Image: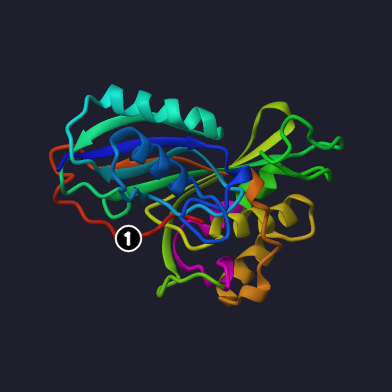
Amino acid sequence: MPRYKLTIEYDGTTYCGWQRQKNGISVQETVERALLAFCGEAVTLFGAGRTDAGVHATGQVAHVDIAREWKTDTVRDALNAYLREEGGVAILSAERVPDGFDARFSARKRHYLYRILNRRPPPSILKGQVWWVWRSLDVAAMDRAAKRLLGTHDFNTFRSVNCQAKNPVRTLERLDVVQGPGGEVHIHASAQSFLHNQIRSFAGSLKLVGEGRWTEGDLVSALESRDRKRCGPVAPPDGLYLTRVDYASADDQAEQVGDGGVGEE
């Protein structure tokens, strides 16, 4: 049975998250409905990361098995024809991949962006797309503090109380805080996998550093405490984006198995 890799973009504002749920319409369910309309099959879509309600994606990856062989452009365009009626979800590309490819378990690295709109006026066009912080932020101080979190640590402080991961140890490969366009502050994070709410917890704690309410030492002390109560406020989902998922080359995708991390949310 042919397996297809889909790269998906979505505005998470109106969805209950990536994963199919009973309390609302999810991105997964929305794409599965489009697949049913397209190929007449009730299939299951498997994603690289289970983003929460309100979280967005510009590069979510999923795989699906379809009984019939289709041209990849046909899969992409046909799904988008159905998804246009839903609004908020688009298939950026469709690719044929080996049977051993798994959107979640084959992932080598996940990349996220967190957007903070740092200005006095509130957002209008960007409402639901950014976290509005009106107090001036010291971006350089935030970036210096962020670098203290790099490497392999027990990140229990920076995860949700509902996180289902058995092991809170993760290796954080990138955490950069930079000045973005239009008064935005961007936080870039990369790792093979993240804990639930980890990046939003980082963003909330780094905001305290940017406002001068925390020092680098305070952030490190919170990390070393391994105590969820020592975390800063959890930033809202509005500013979080899954931007890219990295995989092995086509030659060894079938053999690669990751740790099964589900992404940040």
Residue 75: image location, x then y, percent: 30, 28
Q: Is residue 38 above or below residue 106?
A: above
Question: Does 186 sit left or right of 9 as displayed?
Answer: right
Q: Residue furthest right?
A: 120
Q: Quadrant of residue 185?
A: top right
Task: State the colouring used for the structure image.
Answer: rainbow
Looking at the rendered structure, the kind of residue marked 1 is: Gly
Q: Position of residue 132 (x, y in %)?
A: 76, 43
- Magenta residues, as a range? 146-161
Q: Nearer the viewer, residue 145 or 170?
A: 170
Give the left or right position of residue 97, taking residue 173 as reference.
left
Q: Is residue 217 left or right of residue 165?
A: right
Of residue 173 and residue 1, the one placed in the foreground of this image is 1
The quarter of the displayed image where residue 172 is located: bottom left
Quadrant where the N terminus lies?
Answer: top left
Dot 1 falls on a residue whose secondary structure is loop
Q: Is residue 134 above or below residue 232?
A: above
Which residue is located at x 58 percent, y 47 percent? 15
Residue 143 image point, x, y percent = 62, 46
Task: Count residues near mark 1 (Cα–Cα under 10 Å), then give few for <14, some for 14-19, many for 20+.
Answer: some
Residue 192, image x and y in percent? 37, 53
Residue 88 versus residue 160 in the image, above or below: above
Residue lying at 23% horizontally and 41% vertically, measured from the top left? 66
Residue at the (74%, 31%) spot, across then down: 183
Q: Nearer the viewer, residue 123 or 34?
A: 34
Judging by the rendered image, the residue that carries numbered circle 1 is: 260
Instruction: Give me the residue at 84% from left, 45% from top.
Output: 135
Query: On screen, 253 above or below 198?
Result: above
